[in-house]
Image: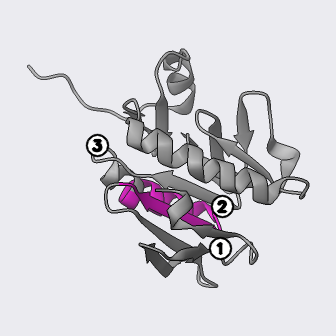
Amino acid sequence: MLPQYRKITYDEFLKLDNGDDLLEYIDGEVYLLSSPSAEHQRTLLNLATEFNLFFKGKECEVFIAPYDVVLSKEDDKNIHQVQPDLMVICNKDGIKENKYVGVPDLIVEVMSPSNTSHDRIRKFNLYMRYGVKEYWLINPKFKTIEINMLNEEGFYEQVGVYKGDDIAKSILFEELDINLKDIF
């Protein structure tokens, strides 16, 4: 007989999360994150450097993985825990030593072949549902940056896809310009 599939509670997830594995918890399901590739890490490091320089001395703060983000709503009993590659947090009230409880203003995910559908579908919908204002998807293989902005109806609108010699421009942080040559 095959074992029965079932979703687990957030408390059960916390008992699994021993710190050795990179785990995410979305809609009652646990996702084991694979170790990032060298290309992923180079891209993330280059981007984090640009973001850190831009936000230095400003009210918002930049964090990179591994740092847990706990998403929940008062009117919803669901709790989710994810590890975005990079995030910008302006409301610092939820910053704890090992996690952020709240909704980051901007999240960046660097896609790898093993996580593309996770970032492009599952996390895209989760971030949209919880009100992450701006969501960047970076594809190191094709050297592209896709920027999505939450519209007034609460849905993501793709506001730009950047490649080659382009300069990616944040909508939320108007002066944040990222030259793709500095990232890839």
Instruction: Give the magenta-colored segment's residue range.
Output: 120-140
For image coordinates 85% across by 48% down, the residue present is 92
Residue 123 included in the magenta stretch of the image? yes
Q: Is residue 128 left or right of residue 53?
A: left
The residue carrying mark 2 is: 106
Residue found at the far left of this picture: 1
Q: Label 1 crowding class (10 Å Cα cut-off): few <14, some 14-19, many 20+?
A: many
* Label disc, if present, on residue 170 of the rendered structure: 1
* Label disc, if present, on residue 114 of the rendered structure: 3
Q: Is residue 172 left or right of residue 20?
A: right
**Quick one: 127 or 146, which is closer to the camera?**
146
Residues marked 3 and 1 touching at CB (< 8 Å): no
Residues marked 3 and 2 touching at CB (< 8 Å): no
Whichever of labels 3 and 2 marks the residue nearer the N terminus, that label is 2
Please name the amino acid that badge 3 sits on: Ser
Please name the amino acid that badge 2 sits on: Leu
For image coordinates 39% across by 51% down, the residue present is 111
Q: Closer to us: mark 1 or mark 2? A: 1
114 over 9 or under it: above or below: below
Q: In this view, does 118 lie to the left or right of 133?
A: left
Please name the amino acid that badge 1 sits on: Ser
